[in-house]
Image: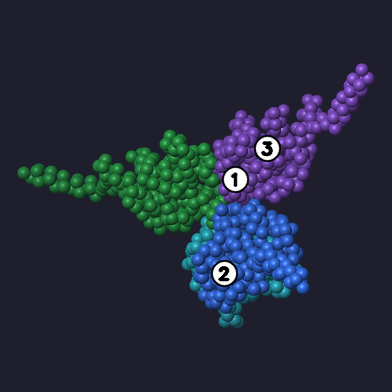
Chain colours: A blue, B cyan, C green, D purple
């Protein structure tokens, strides 16, 4: 039965070899966005927090979370750099978290994004990612001001753009993380003085410690973790 | 019969005296505002409708309703012309109906009014009118878009300015006609498709036939008629 | 010596009469404007410099220079406060130095001033001052950016508003201090690198030390001193 | 010498074959731009005029001129569609004529393009075209208003963006058609009343008959025809 022994050894070796060539591969998730996501990888940022939460849960090795946020980015800026900053990283999942600047910069610099063009660039971007087999998750922009009575200057416009993203999620078969809805709910419960900042944001837009934690949790839930 | 004659003469004289000292004088109301009020005195306008309603109710002679609206006016434009266009008419009541352009023109021409200056001019105007013994009634701006989910582009800002006016009404002891609140309530009941125009406005801002009727009724109610 | 006594009495009386009818009164000049003028009364400000120059020339007692500048003011803000801040001071001369914010705030807050309303408020203000016998001097707004090739973002609009003021000076018979023209000439000679700040301004708008000195000299010249 | 004869016949046939496979091919030029170029292919449009001029000169078959203009397009809109609308047509030359909306829409919709992003998208677009061996020609945006004293509202900004394009032409080794410079020169000679429209444009931006002719001639010259 020497040959059987040999066969056994060969099978074991082959298996070992196969495993060594197909090792466990963590799920790679790219967070694609603006300054909120750029800060997300810093100390206390929402991506950093997600990593910490995963570590504590013993799932640290299961996921590779990559931040791809650049301050001031709008949807068309993401489109300009998605090849180098997203595709080049071969992600399994891309979370698109953009829209604040597309609205915000209308006031101020006068360089926001028209709603029809926002829709066009967003759609094209998602399709280009999906064409590569990437699972794409969409987020609504959380806030430009935290007042709960819709009296933040750009609430109307931000609601409108959030609505566009919700609709696109349905049309493009993407999971949706509705940060705007969640932020409003949180503020309705925790912002009795109707302040415009200081609850989840430092400055009406960028996340404070609680805001980063809140987004980290919503992102993990949205990723089904 | 000398005494009867005398009595008759006395009665006549007394009556004449009474009438000459207390002649019938209609209550004079000036509507002070922008293009919505300018159109208000045209055919089908809300002031024209108020007059028709009063006529039908047999109260046509009790009130003199005067339109003092000029297209494009903001709060500071009212301040520039209140002497000639309001004080010169010696009104009993002034209804201030302004604020749409103060918000609307931020987008577009970039010539809206800062909230702090809106408050300052508004306050000064009301006080100058009150100093003359005029009763001043304030109106919130009705709408820049009729969608009911607060996704009209400038809803946030318009809500904020409506809030300023509500607060001023309290501080300055003025009656308030809360058109914005009433328009939203009407649209919630009558705009199931969430359209941005065509319910009470023709173009998101200016009143259609129903809008003029709605405002006419709210104004009459606000005037206590 | 009766006649000597008489003479003495006459001299005394004459002197008293002269002094009572022709007391020495410095010429009172109010500088009415925005943050540039507000800073003008601070250390190193253009009004402070004018005072120092007059002192050195031994004319310190001939003029009373009063700053009435408030940051962020536009033409209609001046109109709102001209009674308390200008008329109440009984000036002989008022120098109006405004216009930067009327243009500047179109970009940014979206709260600039329409050209037709700028003209209207400016005209009304000048006439109200002239009606009180005040001599009114107009200034063009100096700069929003110091590049000399008309590539500062709002050069076109600022040129247009400067043109309005030049025209008004003619129509309303006011002396003109054409700061915009003078600033451009200075920069053409002294700004070879086409920088947008740092020549006469610190930040494209507000005056540095040289800018304050330059304006002080132009103001003195404009006042005919 | 039979073989020589055969050789000769073969050579002739081969030559004929070669020529039949490499027929004369007109030079293909794509004009890539906004509404001005979209109108350029209509009756009286500048591209239509170029074709007519070439026909008259007997060069109609030498060039294929293709319009690829879409109303409202900014530099990033060109970037979104350059593959389908330009590369797919295999042009020899691409004339990029864009920039008006990038500046214009800052006022109005508040959706212009920041200068740094304008530069970034423009650069990337030119390089992508050059990578395909296409000769790229740049145009400065002609006008938003025809006044010659730089008092058109957005002259400053438009001058700045024209400057960016001039610089890019140098850096990227592209021929430049400096429409802005030419339009100003034309207006200085032909617009003595300093009108803001009606000389080369109908509405400050879009070309009238003379404007289309002027651009047609400048384009032909720029193309070296």
* Measured Cα–Cα span from mark 1 to mark 2: 37 Å
Image quadrant of residue A117? bottom right
Q: Quadrant of the N terminus of chain B?
A: bottom right
* Measured Cα–Cα span from mark 3 to mark 1: 16 Å
Image quadrant of residue B8? bottom right
Kind of element beneath mark 3? strand
Image quadrant of residue A220? bottom right
Query: Is residue A46 shown above or below C208?
Result: below
Which chain contains the residue that carries disc 2?
A
Where residue A70 sits: x, y (%)?
Answer: 57, 57
Q: Nearer the viewer, residue C54 or C1?
A: C54
Kind of element beneath mark 2? helix
The image's mark for residue D119 is 1
Which chain contains the residue that carries disc 1?
D
Residue sitting at 57 percent across and 67 percent down? A47
Query: Is residue A188 shown above or below A152?
Result: below
- From this viewpoint, which residue is outermost toward the front? A2
- From this viewpoint, which residue is outermost toward the right? D2
* Circle 2 crowding by C-alpha within 10 Å: few under 14, some 14–19, many from 20: many
Residue sitting at 37 percent across and 39 percent down? C221
Where residue C187 sits: x, y (%)?
Answer: 44, 38
Where residue B134 sits: x, y (%)?
Answer: 53, 68
Q: Is residue A207 left or right of residue A28?
A: left
The image's mark for residue A51 is 2
The image's mark for residue D224 is none
Residue sitting at 47 percent across and 51 percent down? C125
Which chain contains the residue that carries disc 3?
D
């Amino acid at each position: 039965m020497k040959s059987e022994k040999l066969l056994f050894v060969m099978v074991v070796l082959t298996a070992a070899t196969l495993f060594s060539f197909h090792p466990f591969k963590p799920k790679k998730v790219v967070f694609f966005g603006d300054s909120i996501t750029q800060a997300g990888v810093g100390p206390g940022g929402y991506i950093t927090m997600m990593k910490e939460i995963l570590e504590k849960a013993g799932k640290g090795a299961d996921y590779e979370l990559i931040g791809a946020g650049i301050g001031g980015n709008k949807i068309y800026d993401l489109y300009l750099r998605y090849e180098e900053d997203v595709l080049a990283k071969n992600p399994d999942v891309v979370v698109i978290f953009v829209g604040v600047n597309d609205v915000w910069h209308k006031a101020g610099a006068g360089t926001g994004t028209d709603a029809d063009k926002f829709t066009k660039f967003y759609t094209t971007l998602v399709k280009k990612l999906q064409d590569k087999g990437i699972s794409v998750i969409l987020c609504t922009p959380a806030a430009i001001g935290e007042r709960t009575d819709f009296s933040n200057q750009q609430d109307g416009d931000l609601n409108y753009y959030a609505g566009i993203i919700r609709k696109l999620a349905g049309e493009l078969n993407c999971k949706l993380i509705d940060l705007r809805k969640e932020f409003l709910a949180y503020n309705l419960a925790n912002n009795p003085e109707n302040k415009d900042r200081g609850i989840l944001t430092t400055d009406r837009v960028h996340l404070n410690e609680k805001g980063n934690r809140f987004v980290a949790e919503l992102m993990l839930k949205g990723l089904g973790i």
